[in-house]
Amino acid sequence: MSEAYRILGPADADILIVADHASNRVPPGVDLQIDPHHLSAHIAVDIGVARVSELLVEDGGFHAILANISRLVIDLNREPDSPGLVPLESDGIAIPGNVGADVPARIRDYYEPYHAEVEALTAAAHSPFILSIHSFTPSLTSRPEEVRPWQIGILYNEDERAAPIAIQALRDRGLNVGDQLPYSGRLLNATMNRHAEAHGRHYLGVEIRQDLIMDEAGQRLFADHLRAAVAQVRTSLL
């Protein structure tokens, strides 16, 4: 085990949740030198994702690996040579504590253990279906002119198998669904590229708008939406 992640649910569950940005935790010994209120914002954590994941696990049929460190410490959904791996700023907020950070140490202590565990779980003998969960802010401080009306987005890179099925299933539930929105998975899909697409493993990548999952009612609603969408995808693909 590692402090970089936490594991929920039975290891033999048919569906594995992977949540790269589920925590705003800053480990002892790391000082980001930012105002603490930034740690509750979208730059530090995918708001609502941890609880949505917990609800899916609690209801049965899901296993989960949730990141246990903030994306401001190291972004687990980046390539290890990405300039944004240890961010110096995010949405216009400077992260002075990351200037001159020991990046190899953070890779060793957090990035590598997390991805080693994701690989072990995704490669399990029963071939779990992978559900990648993220959330997005309704508006970026640095780009206020951008309109982000989608309630949920479906992201992917080269593997498009799950996307049209999930998009239709979610639209049938009355949701405004973005296809490769609010950004494209062809630009940012590192964890799923590595652990799903590179091996031909079935997966679904979702982004939920954060203002919709800030309380228990919204989190429960979107857990139900995701459960239904994944069921439809698995029925169609497996």
Image: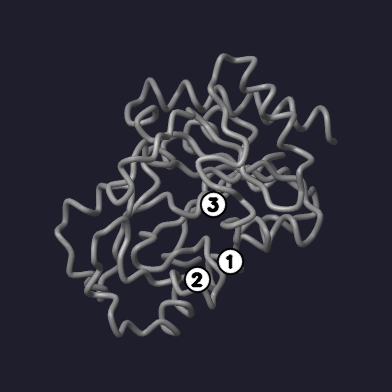
| Helix, strand or loop for disc 1 | helix
Q: Which residue is mark 3?
A: 65
Q: Which quadrant holds the C terminus?
A: top right
In the image, is 160 to the left or to the right of 56? right
Q: Which residue is mark 2?
A: 111
Name the kind of residue labelled 3 in the image: Ile
Label for residue 115? 1
Q: How far is disc 1 from disc 2 in space, using C-alphas?
A: 6 Å
Residue 121 locus on image (x, y percent):
66, 56
Label for residue 197? none
Q: How far is disc 2 from disc 3 in space, using C-alphas?
A: 13 Å
**In contact (CB < 8 Å): disc 3 and disc 1:** no
Residue 26 locus on image (x, y percent):
29, 63
Query: Which image quarter: residue 34?
Result: bottom left
Which residue is farthest left? 35
Name the kind of residue labelled 2 in the image: Tyr
Name the kind of residue labelled 1 in the image: His
Of the numbered discs 3 and 1, the one sitting upstream in the chain is 3
